[in-house]
Amino acid sequence: MTAQTDTTAPVTTVYKVTGMSCGHCEGSVSGEISQIPGVTSVKAVASTGEVTVVSEAPLDEEAVRAAVDEAGFELAGQA
């Protein structure tokens, strides 16, 4: 029998963000989303418009939308 101290696995979600065109855009979006509680990593790719977010639990899409809006872009939804 093995003891488990953490029973929750990380959650990976891919979002589509419109308007990103460069590395600065990627950094802005990543920076805002990374401030959401529970987010452990963010990778934004301007060329595809995809933002991959790893979090401790599923995120509230409205919180992600607000973070993307704050960065000056639009969340199109999950990819």
Image (spheres, rainbow, N blue to C red):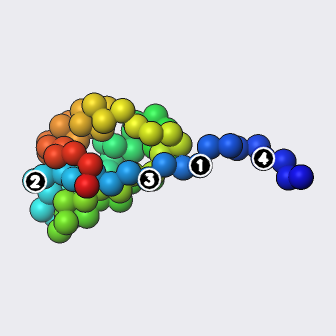
- Image quadrant in which you'd find residue 72: top left
What's under tag 2, amino acid-wise? Gly
Nearest to the observer: residue 30 or residue 52: 52
Q: Is residue 5 visible?
A: yes
Q: Secondary structure at mark 2?
A: loop
Q: Secondary structure at mark 1?
A: loop
| Residue depicted at x 24% and y 33% | 66
| Residue depicted at x 19% and y 60% | 49
Mark 4 or 1, nearer chain start: 4
Q: CA distance from mark 1 to mark 3?
A: 10 Å
Q: CA distance from mark 1 to mark 2?
A: 31 Å
Q: CA distance from mark 4 to mark 1?
A: 11 Å
Any mark on residue 4, and which? Answer: 4
What's under tag 1, amino acid-wise? Ala
Name the mark nearer the viewer: 3 or 2: 3
The residue tagged 1 is 9
Check whether the beta carbons of the residues at disc 3 and disc 2 lie within 8 A of each other: no
CA neighbours of label 2 inside 10 A, class few (<14), some (14 to 19), many (20+): few
- Image quadrant in which you'd find residue 73: top left
Q: Please, is residue 37 above or below residue 71 in the view?
A: above
CA neighbours of label 4 inside 10 A, class few (<14), some (14 to 19), many (20+): few
Any mark on residue 19, and which? Answer: 2
Q: CA distance from mark 3 to mark 2?
A: 22 Å
The residue tagged 3 is 12
- Image quadrant in which you'd find residue 50: bottom left
